[in-house]
Image (cartoon, rainbow, N blue to C red):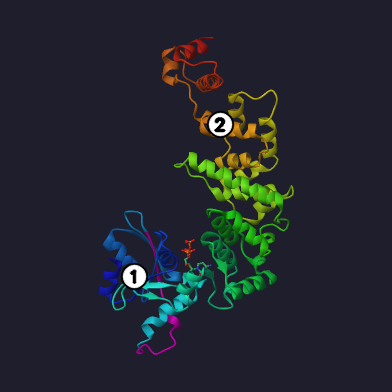
Amino acid sequence: EAGQLADRLDLPLYVVGGCVRDLLLGIENLDLDLVVEGDGIAFARKLAAEQLGRVKAHDRFGTAVIVLPDGLKLDVATARTEYYEYPTALPTVEQSSIKKDLYRRDFTINALAVRLNGRGFGEVLDFYGGQRDLKNQAIRVLHSLSFVEDPTRVFRAVRFETRFGFHLGKDTLALAKAAVKMALFQKLSGHRLLEELKALCSEREPKSGLKRLAELDLLRFIHPKLSWTPRLEKLLFAVEETLDWYRLLYLDRKLEAWLVYMMAIAAVLPDRGVTDLLKRFPFSEREATTLKALRGGAHRLLRQLSKQPPLKPSGVCRILEGAQDEALVAIMAQSPSDRVKRLVSAYLTAWRQAVPRLTGKDLQSMGIKPGPIYGTVLTQLRDAHLDGLVKTEAEERAFIEK
Ligand code: CTP
């Protein structure tokens, strides 16, 4: 439909970037990036109106986001026609603005476009050797100032290496190393660097990406004391395993895996490490709380959980209640003790869902006046239930009477 609208408006329309790359790799990608040679925002507004979607425009950048009723998201951008070098009459001009638009992008594999309308419909536009690099599994920049213009691209390069098992091209590797020497990353805002770290640590196997950051001497920009050690490697391996386990259990629960990796990183830093990270990066309140739970807290939790005589299930619940799942996974990964792992696992999979059979209504019918006492009674009942002291409803009633 976007193509038809572009036809009616007589505007060349392209799909570009990661979506084209993934299409050629045979990987599903539902984030569509469109580029219009013309007024991108006006085009987005018309398209959204026709498709009953919502639209949000950023006038300053000439971009807009459309969200369609079925949830599909479209990014629409304006090809920067202000860079025209040639009189508009030249036949090459039509392609010149999309060509320029693609030239501003990070890597050749992300600088591919497919025409969605008019003459050349369905054609792949490949000005910079993107298809060759996809075949060669190479990450290459388009020009030598790419990393200077945008240093986060070095992190993006590592992310694409990690995700696709690709490697940096020879010249690109040299340019990345030069960027590291120039320490361009110190000037990056905490916000942008955090976005990159989040993205890297949200990949399926971030461990190899973090190792690659270490090889490129980039870990120190996360924290000056962060380096690749056998301890970190072992911990990341444990995090990977624990996350795999967790995912098998909780397919419908959302866990910020990147935060677990962040906790692993924080765990190998010196004592002030977490404080430093919280200063450098704009974590949300929930993220900060989870990270702080680690400071001293993780060790305390681990100690409490390994207490002798062993804790009863209700005791484990009391200790772990309120902890975010990310923290629990991080604690499991960090714990050297199988017993502790089993306790956290039992808590995650069973104990924390435990509820007594009786409800507030039942308490009322037993003649107990509603009030804060209900919470106390029901918690005690749940604990008794967890610890195997009561099983049937009759036993629960008897427990309350007592
Ligand atoms: N881009 C860029 N430089 C950046 C960030 C993005 O040139 N620092 C360009 C890339 O061409 C990229 C496009 O903007 O293809 C869209 O960015 P993004 O959605 O972050 O990248 P994708 O390639 O779609 O990656 P992903 O699959 O991780 O979403």
> Which span is picked out in magenta?
73-90
Q: Secondary structure beneath disc 1?
A: helix
- Image check: 111 left or right of 124? right
Cβ of mark 1 under 8 A from ligand 1:
no
Q: Is residue 198 above or below residue 8?
A: above
Residue 42: give x, y in percent of width and height.
34, 70
- Residue assigned mark 1: 42
Q: CA distance from mark 1 to mark 2?
A: 53 Å
Label 1 amino acid? Ala
| Figure quadrant of residue 312 | top right
Q: Is residue 254 above or below residue 350?
A: below
- Residue assigned mark 2: 347
Q: Looking at the figure, which quarter contains the C terminus?
A: top right
Q: Is residue 324 above or below residue 87?
A: above
Q: Earlier in the sequence, mark 1 or mark 2?
A: 1
Nearer to us: label 1 or label 2 = 2
Q: Is residue 296 above or below residue 42?
A: above
In depth, the one of 63 and 395 nearer the eye is 395
Q: Is residue 81 magenta?
A: yes
In depth, the one of 23 and 368 nearer the eye is 23
Residue at x 48% of width, y 21% of height = 356
Residue 263: give x, y in percent of width and height.
63, 47
Residue at x 47% of width, y 70% of height = 135
Would you call the spot at circle 2 few (<14 residues within 10 Å), some (14-19), or many (20 or more)? many
